[in-house]
Image (cartoon, coloured by chain):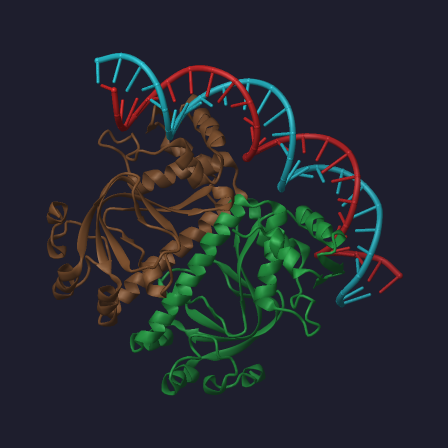
Chain colours: A brown, B green, C red, D cyan
DNA sequence: CGTCAGCTTGATTACTTTCAATTGTTGTGG
DNA sequence: CCACAACAATTGAAAGTAATCAAGCTGACG
């Protein structure tokens, strides 16, 4: 209960990038009245693949991975969410169960918006539905590119690309070179669709070649340019 | 010019599945006034990746593949369109260049709807934008599933899956067992993200095992159940 | 009926996974 | 605070899968 008090009101939310943030004051007020903020600990699940999509989630802060199980229980990470992102809206919009599981990578605070309230706002707001369409097209484009990458690139290229994705999503720590996300080797493997061992070997190569520096779980990017060249962008 | 006369008016179009078809009569009339039908020969390109998205296309009839070039000019087929499908709406909606190339696999008749007219109808029609959102979410779901498939399945599983996709998309000829699409081995390889040789070898295995029967370009499905089991669905 | 594109097969090579064994790290309860 | 348990990272060796390379075949079409 006390945790919820930490969440600012939508109208004074410091995030500005989410589709919700762009709403008019009175529409935000509608959502404000009914939304609930919640604290999630690292490793906690926000929602699970296959369950009913009753809420849209708006990330106040934190880091989230979206995963799906493949064959033999092998996980695949296919997207991340962070501060200001909207989560689960796709399933809510299409009236289907959640299509993935969302798991918190670092402690997060996330607001839940009940599906009805969400629809309510869409119905009266043409520009929100356009915004959502934009989000969807962006995700779709990303997914298709990712598909081609996995299909045609080597493990080395995919690991380089996973690192670039992490940089683009979570950025650096204040030192401007340490990746600002705590992530395991096997999670990196799950982004690049390879095995943990191959991920380790490849990272180790990058390390030996001086492109990155590995210090336990900390990943320091020494040579972003070289790294990008290794992704073999089209 | 004469070709265009072949295209029925939107209000009497026999297709019923497209988002356009579901519009009200007067909205269809608006589109009818401005749309243009065109005939495309096998192999012809409807639009090309990277060019301006000025039209939404509505497939009156025919079969289309959506492709993207990967590294070293290797093509990847990532979706098909057929009778009644909408094409290119995603790029139009998000105001971006086409994100893929669309190529006609068998002679087709396709209507072009100028982008402004399309937006015009969306703006006045909340339910169309919801329909489009549904389409997008469906495509996105498909793309994500495809990603996991490519990432985690063997070539054999992927080829089986490609066949299933072809069946689901284009169905059978009247004999109820011959695949109703003319497709090359290398195109099948491009669906399954593998090489032509591997595709051939795998098809040949299925043939020897009696799951399918290859007769030149004709692909006859003998044992759909077995084939489905070979896809190793999750 | 010749040509060109598509199809097929075999042999070799390269890349990645798998398996196994070991070391390192972290969080927890006594 | 230590010790232990559980999890994470690392490395080497072997096995497997699929890509590549090379060559010959087949069939459709002008």
Q: Nearer the viewer, residue D2 or A220?
A: D2
In the rendered image, residue A49, in percent from the top left (x then y), is placed at 39, 52
* Drawn side of residue A144 relative to residue C5, left or right: left
The reply, left or right, for residue A219 in relation to residue D12 is: left
- Residue at position x 54%, y 74% from top? B83
Task: Name the residue located 27 percent from the left edge and 58 percent from the top edge.
Answer: A55
In the rendered view, would you say B186 is above or below A31? above
Q: Is residue B129 above or below residue A135?
A: below
Number of marks in picture: 0
Residue A30 is situated, as x and y percent measured from the top left of the image, at 15, 64
Q: Look at the image and tell me whether residue B81 can be seen.
A: yes
Evaluate whether residue B104 shows in this view: no
Q: Does residue D27 appear left or right of residue B116 in this picture?
A: right
Nearer to the camera, A131 or A40:
A40
Residue B212 drawn at (x, y percent): 71, 58
Spot occupied by residue B173 in the image (x, y as percentages of width and height)? 67, 71
Q: Nearer the viewer, residue A180 or A75?
A: A75
Residues A48 and B19: in front is A48
């Amino acid at each position: 209960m006390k945790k919820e008090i930490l969440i600012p009101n939508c109208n004074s939310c410091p995030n500005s990038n989410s589709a919700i943030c762009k709403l008019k004051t009175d529409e935000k007020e509608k959502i404000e009245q009914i939304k609930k903020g919640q604290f999630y600990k690292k490793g906690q699940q926000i929602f699970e693949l296959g369950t009913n999509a009753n809420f849209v989630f708006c990330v106040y802060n934190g880091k989230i991975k979206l995963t799906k199980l493949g064959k033999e229980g092998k996980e695949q990470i296919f997207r991340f969410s962070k501060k200001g992102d909207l989560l689960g809206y796709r399933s809510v919009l299409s009236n289907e169960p959640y299509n993935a599981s969302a798991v918190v990578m670092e402690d997060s605070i996330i607001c839940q918006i009940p599906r009805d309230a969400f629809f309510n706002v869409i119905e009266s707001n043409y520009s929100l539905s356009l915004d959502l369409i934009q989000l969807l097209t962006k995700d779709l484009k990303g997914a298709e590119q990712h598909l081609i990458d996995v299909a045609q690139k080597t493990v080395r290229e995919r690991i380089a690309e996973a690192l670039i994705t992490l940089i683009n999503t979570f950025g650096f720590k204040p030192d401007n070179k340490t990746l600002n996300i705590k992530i395991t080797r096997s999670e990196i493997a799950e982004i690049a669709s390879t095995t943990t061992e191959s991920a380790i070997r490849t990272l180790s190569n990058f390390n030996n070649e001086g492109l990155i520096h590995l210090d336990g779980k900390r990943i320091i990017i020494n040579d972003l340019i070289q790294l990008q060249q290794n992704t073999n962008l089209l």
